[in-house]
Image (spheres, rainbow, N blue to C red):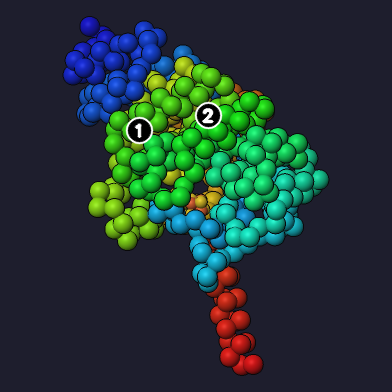
Amino acid sequence: MNGIDGLLGGCRAEVRAVLERALSGERVSWQDGVVLCGARGRDLHALALTADVLREQQAGERVAYVVNRNINFTNVCVKSCRFCAFSRTNRSAEVYYLEVEEVVRRAVEAREMGATEVCVQAGLPPNPRQDLYLELLRALRAAVPDVHVHAFSPEEVKYGAEVSGTPIPEYLQQLKDEGLGSIPGTSAEILDDAVRKRLAGGRITTAEWIEVITGAHRIGLPTTSTIMYGHVESDAERMRHLDLLRSIQEDTGGFTEFVPLSFVHTEAPLYMKGMLPDVRPGPTGDDVVRLIAISRLMLGPSVKNIQTSWVKEGLKQAQWLLSCGANDLGGTLINESISTSAGATHGQLTSPAMLRRAIRDAGRIPVERNTRYEPLHVFDHAAQEDPPHPLDGVLDAEERFGSYDRLTAAARAEKRERVQLRRVN
Ligand code: SF4
């Protein structure tokens, strides 16, 4: 016995049976996925290697990334999801709001720095202008028509539709007509209403999330798909989530990629305030490997691109995950607020050169792609021949592009000033 047979020979029988079925192209059920959730030690090595073999068959040797910028234009939100450390109520001294002109300025600056995508997501501001999201799209299209706008989570789409009194399918069409290019499949967490209720009362329901996502797919708006895991969900709830995403993809074909998002607990109210006794402090390193590898086995045949997030995992673990089923490193981001506010410590910009270095060192071929996964530049030559990129020279992203901490600090300072002025007057 040698090669992968030899490796599988060291596995427990039930894990081996699932891995063999996956390697022979059989469908991995969510119940099979639950068996794989028990993979530890050598079982985990075998699972990761199986996922890597399937990754090679399904996605090849290229690893892609997109040069993009996140613009989280406000942290004020009418909801208070228990896992969210980013949002503030409008009574908070830390509320910031970037006006349309500032959103556009950031998008123009991103394009000048080589970005092909802006990712626009935010809190749900109270009493917004009825056409806030449409207005943002119009302004972005006028200023940067060649930049792909990847924007508005299903929760925001639902909110925008409600505020404007428009049914969701029509609202999606309006967003598309104004220049929306694709939608982030965030606000999914775990698509199970009992879990969602525990994480965040009032969160968009599973059925509503599906309505927004499939409605987008139906009119030709692609979306990503995500999971946020490592909090209160069970293995079965995780695996049923993957199974649901797979069934949507088989129906619509509208997911560009799957992005597993580790729960970052450090500043999350759910964890810090002990809101749920059984909440876990995010996944462990092995748990991250398991989920990426199982995603490749379950989703890979229909969602070819499995992304690993350097923001959540750090570039070092993200690089290792490229050998455990992943084939995408996500974006450069330039600004990152959601994970940073929750306590992630991996920064807000990873330059194209750093992404390519990690990819090459994993023995793979770096590719800069656009949001729709079309290759823009294949780096199948030596690193010394890479053309310079404007982002490669940025040594201090916070100083150069601002940050979430600076925005909230400025809001605090402004509020202090207003209070002092009131006292003086
Ligand atoms: S997750 Fe989104 S909707 Fe929920 S509180 Fe945070 S910003 Fe608001």
Ligand 1 has an atom within 8 Å of the beta carbon of the residue at disc 1: no
Q: Nearer the viewer, residue 229 or 155?
A: 155
Mark 1 secondary-structure assignment: helix
As drawn, 335 above or below 178: below
Q: Nearer the viewer, residue 156 or 282?
A: 156
As drawn, 233 above or below 414: above
Mark 2 secondary-structure assignment: strand
Amino acid beneath label 1? Arg
Q: Quadrant of the C terminus?
A: bottom right
Q: Nearer the viewer, residue 1 or 293?
A: 293
- Does residue 13 appear in the picture of this structure? yes
Residue occupying the point 74% across, 57% down: 101
Specify whether 170 is left or right of 203.
Answer: right
Residue occupying the point 58% across, 25% down: 254
Residue occupying the point 59% across, 60% down: 126
Specify whether 411 is left or right of 85.
Answer: right
Q: Which residue is mark 2?
A: 257
Q: Circle 1: is it few (<14), some (14-19), or many (20+) Cα within 10 Å?
A: many
Q: Are marks 1 and 2 in contact (CB under 8 Å)?
A: no
Q: Which residue is mark 1?
A: 238
For the residues labelled 1 and 2, the Cα–Cα distance comes to 17 Å
- N-term-proximal mark, 1 vs 2: 1
Q: Circle 2: is it few (<14), some (14-19), or many (20+) Cα within 10 Å?
A: many
Specify whether 35 is left or right of 270.
Answer: left
- Does residue 355 appear in the picture of this structure? no
Amino acid beneath label 2? Glu
What x and y, as percent, mark residue 36? Answer: 28, 24
